[in-house]
Image: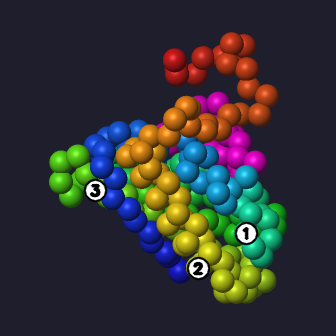
Amino acid sequence: MRPATVHTSISAPRAAVFDYLADLANHVAFTDHFVSEYRLARANSVGAGAAARFRVDAPAGKQWVEVAFMDCDRPRRIAEEGRVGRLGRTRTFGLYELTEPSAGLTRVEFTFWTEPGARIDAFKEALGARAWLRRQNRIALGRLRKVFEERPAGELARATVAGFEPAKAARFGVE
């Protein structure tokens, strides 16, 4: 799939937006309209190496996705890479780029693309997956903006590691 880009502007400092995005556990709060069964793959959900597994509820069929942060260049960009589809044949990539056009305003640009592993996967994507994903990611960035500008009442949703008990876990340098 060719790269597709969506963007939004958020009235918040770039460092605050970056810190929120760099914690993969927070992503469920703004992507749960098209993602379900979101679980962390590692206890440490912040920065490079953080990984998650979730199901995308696409109209053409539900597919499991595994993503991991490959690079976090604070406060400018976050690069993620993953696998999707049958046997994880299709590679998926995402890039969050944060710029600060003026003080207190952050522009978040998310670019995503895939590399299908088989012809049938490329055919399925050609049937409209790109447009659907672009629309869902545009909505997700709008919901991200609302997290900062119209803070919802109560706690925001956060993903956890299945079966993880913090009181019994070893400390991995995270307090």
**Is residue 84 something that shows in the picture?**
yes
Picture quadrant where residue 155 is located: top right
Q: Which numbered circle lies on residue 45? A: none
Membership of 96 in magenta stretch: no
Q: Residues within 10 Å of mark 3 (few under 14, many from 20)?
A: some
The residue at the point 68 percent across, 13 percent down is: 167
- Residue annotated with mark 3: 99
Q: Residues within 10 Å of mark 1 (few under 14, many from 20)?
A: some
- Residue annotated with mark 2: 131
Mark 3 and 1 residues: CB-CB less than 8 Å, in contact?
A: no
Q: Earlier in the sequence, mark 3 or mark 2?
A: 3
- Select label 3 or label 1 by which is in front: 1
Lateral position of residue 148 relative to residue 167, left or right: left
Q: Where 59 sits versus 35, above or below?
A: below
What amino acid type is highlighted by mark number 1?
Ala
Q: Where 151 sits versus 3, above or below?
A: above
Disc 1 to disc 2, C-alpha distance: 11 Å
What amino acid type is highlighted by mark number 3?
Thr
Q: Residues within 10 Å of mark 2 (few under 14, many from 20)?
A: few
Mark 1 and 2 residues: CB-CB less than 8 Å, in contact?
A: no
Please report the bounds of the magenta region as a residue range: 37-54
Residue 73 on image: x %, y %:
37, 47
Picture quadrant where residue 97 is located: bottom left
Label 1 element class: strand
